[in-house]
Amino acid sequence: MPELLSRDQLKAEVQAAQQELLAIRRHLHAHPELSGNEHQTAALVAGELRKLGWRVQEGVGRTGVVAELGSGSGPVVALRVDMDALPVEERTGLPYASLNQGLMHACGHDIHTTVGLGVARILGPLAERLGGTVRLLFQPAEETAQGAAWMVADGAMQGVDALFGVHVFPSLPVGTIGVRSGSLTAAAGELEVEVLGEGGHGARPHQSTDAIWIAARVVSGLQEAISRRLDALHPVVVSFGRIEGGKAFNVIADHVRLLGTVRCLDLDLHAQLPGWIEETVQAICKGYGGEARVRYRCISPPVHNDAELTQLLADEAVALLGRPQVEWLEQPSLGAEDFAELQRETPSTMFRLGVAGPNGCTPLHSNTFAADEASVAVGVEVLSASLLRWLERAAA
């Protein structure tokens, strides 16, 4: 642990700040805002940071906030946390449940934002002694995979030498964290397929080309083709979450629109997938007399954790929490994170923050997702210690 702050001092300061941090977290949870509309959240964050003595810049990446502490020269270490919520109607029954109908912090970004403010509170008094600069990135629009690119375009990553990140993880109990070197999340893409047929009377399907029937073949056929045409050692997931088509119960539909997501851990394979999907979908549709239009958009590359930074964070976590509370994750996640956009040119690591309470925790994006608030203190401790340790080594 850096001499700037002993572990005992760090724990004591986090404990002293806990009630204030939980009050902030509950306010954020009760007032969720969608991607790109985090105006009130950003204003709260900026106000808190200024009170803590940080240099604050608002409107970075549209509704993002960037804050700096330290000399403004020398090595620069950064922490990114995200702020946006989801279009989910909350059903947790919590006393601080969402007051905004149809919106919910169902992915824990209220926890992330609070952890970032907790780190700001712990490091604030150390400004004149840091030997470098700490930069905090409060990012909008992670859920739409746009915010990181917005912040990069506005220069938020300029001069950053190392980057840390955190995401809640309902599979781990509160008081623990998960770390992994290398691939942490998958590359993700957005897939749109339009199936074109020929309409007709529902009583005489043989006189038409049924777009709904063909679309069903596309949904199932892609799954079958993945299992027989692609290497099983390099997993690919294609999931359709939206189907639109048809206008009447007795009319054969001539047009169906499918929207889905594609996930893959292997970058080379991910680059080949758009062409492979196009070829497969066209073959299925033509085989049943229809046509197809296929559009594919890459949402985010995979998050790849730097081995040295990951080990640094794991070492600090072991010292603070104990070795049994730090789990090395065997498998990456097929989830996606636009944190990957921030780490294209910068060594980075993101860890998993356990949030499951005594009764467990429902999955991310669930309308009953309820993170255990004790995770806030764990995140603040681990990240504060890691940022200080990195600066200490960089300045040595």
Image: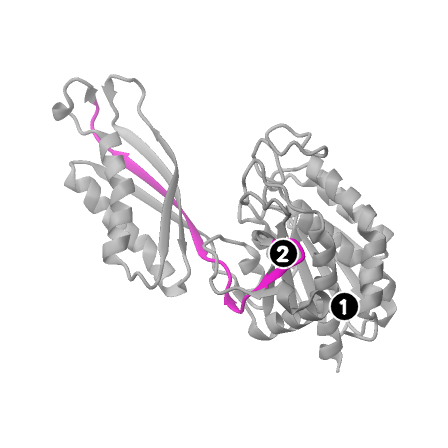
Question: In the visual, does 347 lie left or right of 233?
Answer: right
Amino acid type at mark 2: Leu
Q: Is residue 64 visible to us here?
A: no
Residue at (37, 51) in percent of width and height: 237
Q: Residues within 10 Å of mark 1 (few under 14, many from 20)?
A: many
For marks 2 and 1 on the same chain, the one whose residue lies earlier in the sequence: 1
* Residue at which label 2 appears: 353
Q: Quadrant of residue 53?
A: bottom right
Q: Is the residue 39 above or below the residue 93 in the image?
A: below
What's the mark number on residue 133?
A: 1
Residue at (18, 29) in percent of width and height: 209
- Mark closer to the observer (2, 1): 2
Q: Residues within 10 Å of mark 2 (few under 14, many from 20)?
A: many
Question: In the visual, does 243 lie left or right of 253?
Answer: right
Q: Is residue 349 visible to us here?
A: yes
Amino acid type at mark 1: Thr
SS of the residue under disc 2: strand
Between 122 and 129, the residue placed more toward the observer is 122
What's the mark number on residue 14?
A: none
Q: Quadrant of residue 196?
A: top left
Image position, residue 44 (x, y; %):
77, 43
Its colouring scheme is: one colour
Question: In the visual, does 175 lie left or right of 126?
Answer: left
Image position, residue 87 (x, y; %):
56, 35
| The residue stretch that appears in magenta | 173-199
